[in-house]
Image (cartoon, helix red, strand yellow):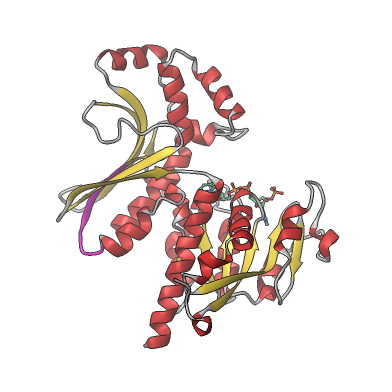
Amino acid sequence: VLAEEDDVKTYDLVLIGFGVVNRALARLIIEEPDRFRSLGFELRVTAIADLAMGSTISPTGIDLAAAMALPRGLTFEEIGGSSAARTEDVIRSAKADIAVEATFTNGVTGEPAASHVRWALDAGMHVVTTNKGPIALHGAELRARASADRCFLFEGSVLSGTPLLGLVRDTLAGTQITAVRGVLNGTSNFVLERMEAGERLEQSVAEAQARGYAEADPSADLNGSDVRLKVTILANELMNAGLTPDQVTTTGIESISASDIIAAARDRRRWKLIGEVHREVDGTVTASVQPVALDTDDPLIGISGATNAVSVTTDLLGPVTITGPGAGATETAFALLADIITIHSQSKDLSRA
Ligand SMILES: NC(=O)c1ccc[n+]([C@@H]2O[C@H](COP(=O)([O-])OP(=O)(O)OC[C@H]3O[C@@H](n4cnc5c(N)ncnc54)[C@H](OP(=O)(O)O)[C@@H]3O)[C@@H](O)[C@H]2O)c1
């Protein structure tokens, strides 16, 4: 059902980063305006800042199709923008309603993404991001920076578009979560599966890279540091733990040998890289990332490839497991859409109050 014409609100967006995820959102905006209108809003991109492509600003809306059509190597100068992006200036001059942050994170500092989020919140925008670094490393500070009527949302930072954070925030709000356990890294999944089929670790990683699963530098996937950031987010956002990533005991999958895999397979067990958070009886929260040989009756044993899953243990419902894509362009853009829908419904609530 399309919303009444008068009810359709237009949100101006500044896209920070114009890579896989923000291009997938741009494609949805170009190709599916009715999807948004039926939700009660239109999305108009008024600014883009990107490292390689530079920046472009247009208060009346950027020609997204022209921006998407620019061949690799060219910059926004070709469509009237600039070949350089001082991202801070672009954010300030964009005067957008929502900043959509989808750049890159340094796993130790959270930069440059953390600064992008700060600048946008300080400029009075809502911020949505798919970037785990700012939340894992600076979540409390950034949340405090958002003014009372602005949202800072990051559904895509842990499970891509699979709606874990929103599910817990909204639908499971009345339960206490005592533990969280998940398979949160598609590359390590793939590599462990190939090793089960008899390949060596190096061979499996090369195959994951050839298929586009693994980064050129796969170390964050293999040494557990990607999952460590995700586990930090889960501990803090779902269990209010106040952990930093260095408090998450972390072991990657590099230590798993062919003989470990064969020994587990003999008992029909399978190795997975498991991220886990647990509240002890005294209230303290511990978190870890480590390879675990799962038993056949474990709900996470069948999670494979780019599919991820998280099982949350709740006081009133027992364990609840959600499974779905942990990566992908459109899937992750969907997380941005989910966050924008939350902004839209909260704005409606505020305007009614
Ligand atoms: N793709 C997925 O499936 C997925 C899933 C969940 C979460 N995420 C997260 O979402 C974020 C974006 O992912 P992606 O796949 O879209 O990455 P991507 O394709 O590498 O895009 C990132 C874009 O940000 C640009 N950028 C880097 N530093 C910048 C800066 N300082 N100012 C402005 N732009 C900057 C990059 O420019 P250059 O190309 O010039 O460096 C690139 O165009 C990442 O944090 C990723 O971890 C991705």
Q: From the image, which quarter does the C terminus lie in? A: bottom left
Q: How many labels does the image show?
A: 0
Q: In which quarter of the image is residue 209?
A: top right
Q: Quadrant of residue 76?
A: bottom right
335 or 92: nearer the eye?
335
Do we see residue 272 in this rendering?
yes
Question: For the point 41% across and 13% down, which residue is it?
Answer: 258
Q: From the image, which quarter does the N terminus lie in? A: bottom left
252 or 90: nearer the eye?
90
Percent position of residue 316, x then y: 14, 56
Q: Is residue 313 magenta?
A: no
Question: For the point 46% across and 36% down, which residue is it?
Answer: 306
Q: Which residue lies furthest to the front in this view?
A: 1
Percent position of residue 318, x then y: 16, 49
53 relative to 114 in the view: left or right: right
Question: For the point 56% across and 59% down, which residue is it?
Answer: 114
Percent position of residue 313, x then y: 22, 48
267 relative to 197 in the view: left or right: left
* Magenta span: 173-181
Do we see residue 148 in this rendering?
no
347 or 116: nearer the eye?
347
The answer to whether residue 212 is above or below residue 102 is above
Percent position of residue 22, x then y: 61, 55
